[in-house]
Amino acid sequence: MKNDNLRNSLKIQRFIRPVDKTKGLPPGSLREPPVEKAIPVTLELFNYNEKGFTSEHIATVDKFFDKSSDLTVKWLNINGLHDIKLMKEIRDRLNIHPLVLEDITHTGQRPKFDDYEEYLYFVIKMITYNRQTHEIFTEQVSIILIDSMVISFQEREGDVFDIIRERIKTNKGRLRKMGADYMAYSLLDVVVDSYFEILENIGGHIQEIEEDLMSHPTVKTLQDIHHIKRDILYLFNSLWPMRQLVNTFYQNESKIIDKTTRFYLKDVYDHIVQVIDTIESLRDVVSGMMDIYLSTVNNRMNEVMKVLTIMASIFIPLTFIAGIYGMNFDNMPELHFKYGYYAVLGIMAIMGILMLSYFKIKKWL
């Protein structure tokens, strides 16, 4: 019971997530994280063009800003947001607005897109799904696109970008032939594509609940419906702003975004619209499951009450006869009748059979 309460409390916190910000600090301020959040920060750097690529983990950002390389595009992926010194160095070298760094380090932002002329900044939600516990987890991913460089910031290690890394290494597709704007699009596209797999898993879980609902609904079935309904609402609230983000990204007239890349962004917009429509459909299905559960429980109760009513209807006249012959008053005509006991039992049996036959004819049974 204690673990269930803790799990429910964590799920509620996903809807009312406190902003990781200290009162009294001026806008754009960065602060040291709590000790339990001070995990090691890792930096993964990719340099590439159509002819070749390099991939390595680096200790500082000096190599990222090194302009001696003849490779065209640079992608720096940062896992962990708790190195304040590193964040300030990136801010100073790229002239990043302090509010951008504040949004990156203070997670819990809504998906959004901002155009700062010299660079573009957007926040997306990367979602993971646990098939065993059927729990949904979200992670904020912040991306800065500037000229030939892309920087992605993640809260922790582990992501859906392995397919991007594989494309760079094997030179599959057009990724290494395009610029940094196409890299930013690719990161956005692979995150949106991962939503479909999550929705497929949720749809499978809904189907399992439906089978239990139609065969033998229990209190656990109702709890599962309630939990998945809350998860779908959480998904909807998390992903609905993505629609506006992708649309703004697509329509943005920044010189950083190539005309060719805009066509691919339109495709991502179509995908996120499809995701939103699917979530709304799942929400309607789950709402219908709640109605089905209530109807099933009411029907089962009605069946039970019908059986009890029929049994009571049969035994009421039999109880009346037994009550009369149980009084034992003097001068009762049948009191000393030799076969009176058997006669009364026979009459009671005949009455029971006649009533059952009548209920059968009326199709009440």
Image (cartoon, grey):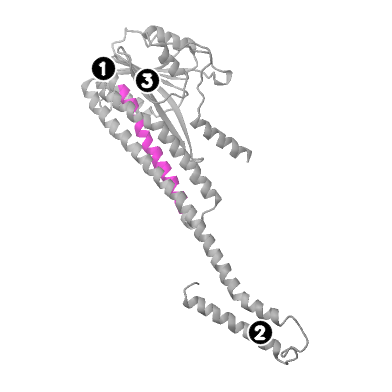
Distance from disc 2 to disc 1, alpha carbons, whole Å, reads 97 Å
**Mark 2 vs mark 1: in front:** 2
Of 261 and 119, nearer the camera is: 119
In the picture as drawn, the residue positioned furthest to the right comes out as 330
Q: How far separated are the C-alphas under marks 3 and 1?
A: 16 Å
Badge 2 element: helix
The answer to whether any part of residue 282 appears in the image is: yes
At numbered mark 1, what does the secondary structure look like: helix, strand or loop? loop
The residue that disc 3 covers is 143
Helix, strand or loop status at disc 3: strand
Residue where numbered disc 1 is placed: 254
Three-letter amino acid code of the residue under disc 2? Leu
Residue at 46%, 38% (x, y): give it: 231
Residue interval drawn in magenta: 183-212
Disc 2: which residue: 345
- Residue 33 is left or right of residue 267, and the answer is right
